Structures are given as structure tokens and as C-alpha cells.
Amino acid sequence: HLHFALMHERADGEAAIFIGDLLIRPDEASPLAFVPGKLQDNPDRARETVRLLLDEIAPGILFPAHGAPILEGGSDAIRLALATDNQG
């Protein structure tokens, strides 16, 4: 099972990543969260992919497939999702 993320590097060097279903955000007031494990083929792999994105790219802007974008502090939003994850 593969996860895809598309990255656009802005002129200022900040990365914007389209993260698909790796993380979701129900509304602008909600933090990013993982899709429930029962809806994933491989929850551990999803978390590994998110950690790699954080370690290797450290995005500033995130566009999840479901929910409002994170327009600043993308890396912090990912760290919070990992810290509050009850499956990882």
C-alpha cells in the first residue's frame, strides 16, 4: 500500500504539501488527525509516512483531502497529530 503526497516549494523556500488522506481535519477549529485505523489498510505505515514528511520536509502549509488547510505551522500541526494519536 502506497501513500502519496504532492509538494510545492514556494519561492520563499517553504513547502506546501497536499497530504491526501494521511491526515484529516474536520473543520478549521479542529487539529489534524489520523483517519481511524479501521478505515486504513495499514495504520502503522500511515504514521511512518507522516513522520518521514515531518523529518525530511518539515512543511509549513498542509492541504488534507478532507478539511480545511493549515496555512501556517504545518510541522507543528503534524507534531500535534502524532502526539495525540491514540493508535501510534
Image (tube, rainbow, N blue to C red):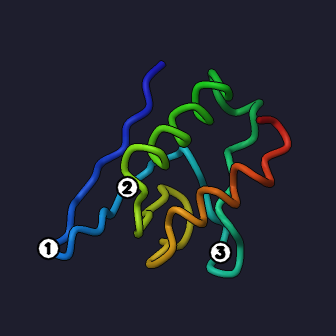
- Going by the numbered disc 2, the residue's amino acid type is Phe
Q: Is mark 1 on a helix, strand or loop?
A: loop
- Going by the numbered disc 3, the residue's amino acid type is Asp
- Going by the numbered disc 1, the residue's amino acid type is Ala
Q: Is mark 3 on a helix, strand or loop?
A: loop
**To which residue does mark 3 refer?**
27
Within 10 Å of disc 2 (Cα), the crowding (few <14, some 14-19, many 20+) is some
Task: Give whichever of discs 1 and 3 has the lower sequence position.
Answer: 1
**To which residue does mark 2 refer?**
18
**To which residue does mark 1 refer?**
11
In the image, taking residue 25 as reference, residue 14 lies left or right, namely: left
- Which quadrant would the C terminus be assigned to in this image? top right
Compute the Cα span from label 1 to label 3: 28 Å
Circle on res. 49? none
Q: Residue 23's x, y, as percent? A: 58, 51
In the image, taking residue 61 as reference, residue 12 lies left or right, namely: left
